[in-house]
Amino acid sequence: MLLSQKSSSIFSPKRLGQLLAVPTEAELEACWELCRLHNNIGFWVVWIPTAWSIAMAYHAHPSLTALDCLYTAAFFVPLCFGVKSLIMTIDDILDYDIDALVERTQTRAIPRGAISVDRAWLFFALQVVIGVTLAFKLLTPTSLHISMFAWPLYVIYPTCKVFSCDLQFHKPTSLLCLKRWMNFAPIPLGFMFAVGVFMGWAELNADGRIPYSTLIPVYLSCVCWTIAYETVYQHQDKVDDMKIGLHSPALWCAEYTIPICTCSAIGFLSLLSYGGMLNGHGLAFYLGVIVAGMSLLVPLVKTDIDRPVDCKNLFLGTPRVGQIILGGLVADALIHRWMAGVPF
């Protein structure tokens, strides 16, 4: 009986009218914030691995033209913005209860009341419908099937935080207690962000053949990269996290964060170099990796994890690292073609 009453209230004309009402200006601004369209780091960490893959395919296949690759790279720009928006939106919806308890995130759209959770879910559903429709219409079958691997991760990632239900700070609920189940959220985040490593190559190959033995090391390198910058980034919230019982890789690594993240960063550079070697890349690529490595490792070892501004600055430098590597890949491919007499 009680369940029936709840169901009828959810689907009552009044409730549906509120849910489907024309969005207000404040709600439109909230949707912009949910997608993080004012901060494009999320776009870069999704698009850059895709662009690496395209540059690697350009190096490996003389039949590809620079125009083909530029078009494919541009084709993925709006798609990667869409992926980033989906990830950020579902993350804010599933984390709104925790965001309200953390000083840095209390002013996000849902905790401050700019948009209701129901309306945020509706906005997310709209994004999913548009995204899935475009994926089926625009992606090649191989690229589409690869993308499907990441779809469950969009929901799994925001739940990957252990929540201990500390009675001192809030009332325990089954949702709060059950929806956080691991300390290592950057791992699924890395697997999710880096799926473009395979999709970029797949879009350029009409026969659907993908050199997985070459691209898997690059894919895993991106996961290591994500672990390095995301773990340091999460140190910004560690004081609040400890108060509310929210565990994270930052708290798990504690004073060993910099050594652990340095090892992860070295793993990133090593795996990426190995993938480049398997693809036949030359000096320009390795110079790009060295410069990018210095750009990552030097600030990393100097980071004071007890100073939030240091942690934020390291995170903000993330796109630059990927862009330097991309520049090395493109330069190497062009030099390779010039020396082999292959048209650009």
Image (cartoon, grey):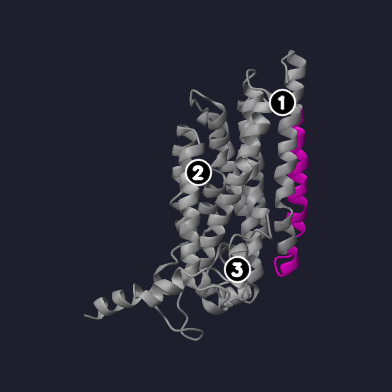
- Labels 3 and 2 touching (C-beta < 8 A): no
Q: Is residue 264 visible?
A: no
**Closer to the camera, 239 or 208?**
208
The residue tagged with tag 3: helix, strand or loop? helix
The three-letter code of the residue at mark 1 reads: Ala
Tell me the crowding category of disc 3: few under 14, some 14 to 19, or many 20 or more residues within 10 angstroms, Cα based: many
Residue at horizontal 77 percent and vertical 23 percent from the top: 335
The residue identified by callout 2 is 134
Residue furthest to the top: 341
Tell me the crowding category of disc 1: few under 14, some 14 to 19, or many 20 or more residues within 10 angstroms, Cα based: many
The residue identified by callout 3 is 30
Q: Quadrant of residue 67?
A: top right
Q: Quadrant of residue 180?
A: bottom left
- Relative placement, left or right, of 253 versus 14 is right
Q: Quadrant of the C terminus?
A: top right
Residue at horizontal 56 percent and vertical 40 percent from the top: 196
**Closer to the camera, 247 or 158?**
158
For the residues marked 1 and 3, what is the alpha-carbon distance in whole angstroms?
A: 43 Å
For the residues marked 1 and 2, what is the alpha-carbon distance in whole angstroms?
A: 31 Å
Position of residue 165 relative to residue 263, above or below, is: below
- Which comes before the other along the chain, label 1 or label 2? 2
- Relative placement, left or right, of 25 versus 17 is right
Residue furthest to the left: 1
For the residues marked 3 and 2, what is the alpha-carbon distance in whole angstroms?
A: 24 Å
Q: Is residue 292 magenta?
A: yes
The three-letter code of the residue at mark 2 reads: Leu
- Which comes before the other along the chain, label 1 or label 3? 3
Q: Quadrant of the N terminus?
A: bottom left
The three-letter code of the residue at mark 3 reads: Ala
Residue 280 x, y percent position in the rendering: 65, 23
The residue identified by callout 1 is 333
| Region of the chain picked out in magenta, as a range | 284-310
